[in-house]
Amino acid sequence: MAVAPGQGIQVHREPGGVLHAYVGLVRTKEWIDTIDFSDPVSATARVVAEFDGWHPALKALITDGDKAPVLRAVHALPQDHRWSRRPGVTLLGDAAHLMPPSGEGANLAMIDAAELGNAIAKGGADTEVALSAYEKKMLARSTIAAKEAAEAKQVLYGENTPQTLLDFFDAKQAAQ
């Protein structure tokens, strides 16, 4: 992983010697809209241009891939997102708590599903009581997770990175 304020390259190895490289850029929608991702050559050139001055080996992780670049915009709901109860309806997973990737998205969705099922099973004939109980727990949990996801984004792409990333790893090592 190589990071700087507003940008980074993360790579992980897959079986068979395959590398998956991810480019993170904190840019406006207007900037993103200037890139034609249907033209892989120009899209790659536009993205790699954001890494001017970076080591050629790092830039090669962007330019030398065998797949066309894929735009994966990151969207997020407000950390304390709430809604008014609607009879017979609730939300779970990203529909309820869309946030920057932090490694917890699938875990949260599975917990949501399990807790929703449990609340309905325990709720008896009154589905509204079950849905309200589920939402109360889910929204409290998702607020904490959304805050942590926003903090992780700052660690990786904030104005003080890479120092914030080094501090994060130092704190984890000291806690062991």
Image: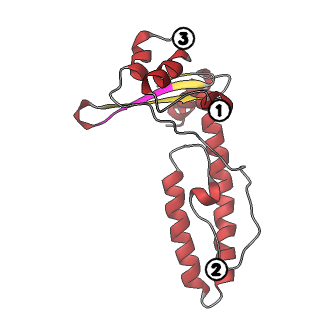
Identified by mark 1, the residue type is: Gln
Residue 121 place in picture, x, y as percent: 54, 83
**CA separation in Å, label 2 and label 3:** 54 Å
Q: How is the image coloured?
A: secondary structure
Secondary structure at badge 1 equals helix
Read off the residue under disc 1. Answer: 154
Q: Is residue 100 magenta?
A: no
Q: In the displayed structure, does residue 69 sit left or right of residue 24?
A: left
Q: Give yes or no for contact between labels 2 and 1 (Cβ–Cβ under 8 Å).
A: no
Point 56% across, 18% down: residue: 50
From the image, tell me which residue sits under label 3.
Answer: 52
Which element carries disc 2, helix, strand or loop? Answer: helix
Three-letter residue code for mark 2? Ala
Task: State the residue at coordinates (44%, 16%).
Answer: 59
Question: Alpha carbon of mark 2 to alpha carbon of mark 1: how far?
Answer: 36 Å
Q: Residue at x 65, y 38 (%)?
A: 151
In the image, residue 63 above or below residue 155: above
Residue type at mark 3 is: Asp
Q: Which mark is residue 130?
A: 2
Which residue is at the front of the view, 19 or 141?
A: 19
The furthest residue to the right? 84
Report the span colored magenta.
9-14
